[in-house]
Image: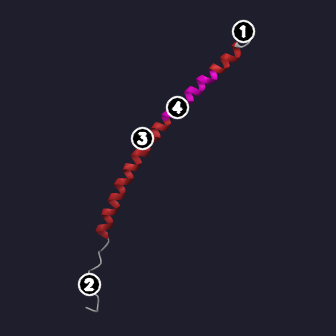
């Protein structure tokens, strides 16, 4: 057995763990990206509904001529 074999084996184990961690982080980022997209769409819909309700609920000021006319 070569003196470097245990070190090489340990490095291979570390690389395998790091690869798994990278894959897990990548999957989590993809999930979060989808969640962010969903939340943006929801926010857009809610903003549009709010603006529509605001138009209906807020009375418009009457257009009157100034007193000097």
Secondary structure predominantly adopted by residues drawn in magenta: helix
Q: Name the disc covering residue 24, or none.
A: 4
Residues under labels 2 and 3: Cα distance? 51 Å
Q: Name the disc covering residue 64, or none.
A: 2
Q: Is residue 40 above or below residue 14?
A: below
Residue extent of the magenta highlight: 13-27
Q: Earlier in the sequence, mark 2 or mark 3?
A: 3
Q: Nearer the viewer, residue 62 or 57?
A: 62
Give the image quarter of residue 49. Answer: bottom left
Residues under labels 3 and 4: Cα distance? 16 Å
In the visual, does 36 lie left or right of 51? right
**Magenta-span inclusion, residue 25:** yes
Q: Position of residue 48 (x, y in %)?
A: 33, 58
Residues under labels 4 and 1: Cα distance? 34 Å
Q: Residue at x 63, y 19 (%)?
A: 12
Residue ID for mark 3? 34
Q: Is residue 4 above or below residue 38?
A: above
Residue ID for mark 1? 2
Q: Earlier in the sequence, mark 4 or mark 1?
A: 1
Q: Residue at x 40, y 45 (%)?
A: 37
Judge the density around disc 2: few (<14), some (14-19), many (≥20) Cα neighbours within 10 Å. few
**Foreground disc of the pair 1, 3:** 1
Q: Nearer the viewer, residue 67 or 30?
A: 67
**Magenta-span inclusion, residue 44:** no
**Foreground disc of the pair 4, 1:** 1
Judge the density around disc 4: few (<14), some (14-19), many (≥20) Cα neighbours within 10 Å. few
């Amino acid at each position: 057995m070569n003196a470097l074999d245990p070190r090489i084996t340990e490095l291979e184990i570390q690389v395998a763990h790091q690869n798994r961690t990278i894959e897990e982080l990548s999957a989590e980022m993809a999930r979060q990206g989808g969640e962010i997209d969903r939340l943006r769409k929801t926010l857009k819909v809610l903003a549009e509904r709010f603006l529509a309700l605001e138009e209906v609920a807020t009375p418009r000021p009457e257009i009157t001529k100034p007193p000097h006319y």
